[in-house]
Image (tube, grey):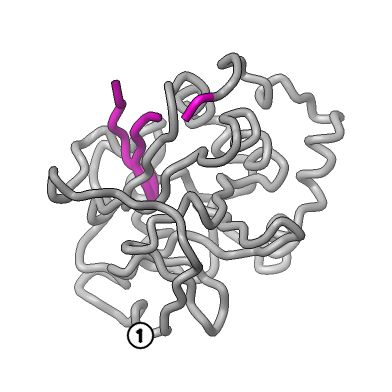
Amino acid sequence: MTTSLLLVLLSVGAAAFTSPQNIASKQTANSPLMLQMESSPRRKFMKDASFFSGALLLSNTKPVFASDETITPGGKITLGSDDIMDPKAHGTSAGPAQENLRYGVSQKLADKICNFNRHFAENGGYFQKTSFEDIVMASKGPVTFYDSVTGKPLFVAPIGRSAEDFVNESYTHGWPSFRDQEVVWDSVRVLKSSGETVSVSGTHLGHNLPDKRGNRYCIN
């Protein structure tokens, strides 16, 4: 049984994981995990750029993509050129972020980050104030995340790791963090010039900030 939601994004459920306890949510401000968050590369990058407040971009509405479409995550990173983000009818997208965004986030703020922004993100740790963790931990398998503007699938996670590992890594860095095997490359590109991670339709999603384990996509 799957659940449908939308993230810069939207979600659906499916991989085995151990007991669905909210492990990450039990971390305290003085725990090693929280202290590690303070020194993460993305956090420093955000502070240096004076990043503004934003949101995890999810919707309750049905994803707007062909119902028979096959979602195939994983594979090698797919690079794109800057012209993907050329101005369109609504910022860098053809239209605004969908209404009724999930987790109680602001549609106005989601629209600003996804469509009228190339560098900024919501405050680090914002997702902890939403139901993102509860939904991931309660899922009976990977969750599919869809573009908040077009409804196209962007990420499927967790794959090759537990739900706890996915949530804990997101806590460590302050933003939902995806790996190569969790990216739907039919819909996602990483710009060669900057590492900016975007949808093929022009939605700003976040940045690729590689670490010793490989590519890590920090997604708003």
* Label 1 residue SS: helix
Amino acid on which the number 1 mark rests in the picture: Asp
The location of residue 66, given as percent across then percent down, is: 13, 49
69 sits left or right of 145 in the view: left
Q: Residue 191 or 162: which is nearer the viewer?
A: 162
**Magenta part of the protein: which range?**
1-16
Residue drawn at point x = 24 percent, y = 76 percent: 88
The image shows residue 171, relative to residue 180, as above or below, that is above
Residue nearest the observer in this picture, 30 or 6: 6
Percent coordinates x, y for residue 101 in the rendering: 32, 39
In the rendered view, tell whether residue 163 sits above or below residue 174: above
Question: In the displayed structure, would residue 78 be above or below residue 133?
Answer: below
Q: Is residue 118 visible?
A: yes
- Tell me: 209 left or right of 76: right
Task: Residue under label 1, please give it.
Answer: 83
Query: Residue placed at 37% from the left, 29% from the top?
Result: 13
Evaluate whether residue 109 shows in this view. no
- Can you give x and y, in whole percent of width and height, for residue 128 in the image? 59, 32
The residue located at (37%, 40%) in the rendering is 144
Residue 131, placed above or below residue 107: above
Q: Main secondary structure of the magenta part?
A: loop
- Does the magenta-highlighted stretch encompass residue 5? yes
Judge by depth and name the residue closer to the eye, 171 or 210.
210
The quadrant the N terminus occupies is top left
